[in-house]
Image (tube, grey):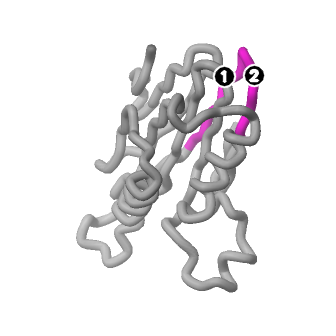
């Protein structure tokens, strides 16, 4: 289970990584089909408000620190950037879209900015809209499932 402001990276043939309550938060899954290195991140905010806040909170709370940590841990276990299948979900607009905070939109923008800067393509995403989501990754097949509104759909499968 990957909690809020949490990340997990594993090298298992048969495991299931799952995160719940992806509202304005973003869930990112990565999977290397050769090494079966898999990972998942559930971050809450795009970036810390200050340097002091960054050091006092879990690195997985923020996209700016959680995304690099997810990828670096996967590389340490043998994943290669060129093989990674990357999927993302969340960034919902749970409150009024005119809200000054727009956390979901800011989370999505930060993710895309970091991926663009680092040349990381997104294989599939299910983002924005009013729905919360549950995201799961099967480490054996790389299949990513999204559950929202009581229905489960395949986001990515081989």
Residue 17 is covered by the magenta coloring: yes
The mark closer to the camera, 2 or 1, is: 1
Residue 131 is covered by the magenta coloring: no
Question: In the picture provided, is 6 more to the left or to the right than 46?
Answer: right
Question: In the picture provided, is 56 more to the left or to the right than 41?
Answer: right
Residue that appears at 65% across and 33% down: 79
Give residue 55's position: percent from left, percent from top: 73, 76
Residue that appears at 64% across and 83% down: 51
Q: Which structural element holds mark 1?
A: loop
Give residue 36's mark.
1
Residue identifier under label 2: 12
Q: Is residue 53 above or below residue 153?
A: below
Which residue is more in the foreground, 16 or 116?
116
Confirm whether residue 104 shows in the render. no
Q: Earlier in the sequence, mark 2 or mark 1?
A: 2
Residue that appears at 71% across and 71% down: 57
Question: Looking at this rendering, what residue extends furthest in the left direction?
Answer: 98
User: What main secondary structure does the magenta stretch of the protein show?
Assistant: strand
Q: Are marks 2 and 1 in contact (CB under 8 Å)?
A: yes
Q: Which structural element holds mark 2?
A: loop
């Amino acid at each position: 289970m990957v909690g809020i402001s949490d990340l997990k990276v594993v090298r298992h043939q048969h495991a299931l990584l799952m995160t719940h309550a992806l509202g304005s938060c973003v869930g990112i899954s990565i999977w290397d089909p050769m090494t079966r290195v898999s990972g998942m991140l559930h971050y809450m905010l795009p970036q810390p408000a200050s340097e002091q806040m960054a050091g006092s909170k879990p690195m997985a709370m923020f996209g700016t620190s959680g995304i690099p940590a997810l990828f670096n841990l996967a590389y340490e276990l043998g994943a290669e950037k060129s093989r990674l299948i990357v999927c993302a979900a969340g960034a919902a607009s749970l409150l009024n879209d005119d809200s000054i905070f727009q956390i979901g939109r800011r989370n999505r923008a930060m993710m895309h900015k970091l991926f663009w800067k680092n040349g990381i393509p997104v294989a599939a995403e299910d983002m924005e809209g009013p729905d919360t989501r549950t995201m799961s990754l099967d480490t054996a097949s790389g299949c990513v499932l999204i559950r929202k509104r009581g229905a489960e759909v395949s986001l990515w499968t081989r």
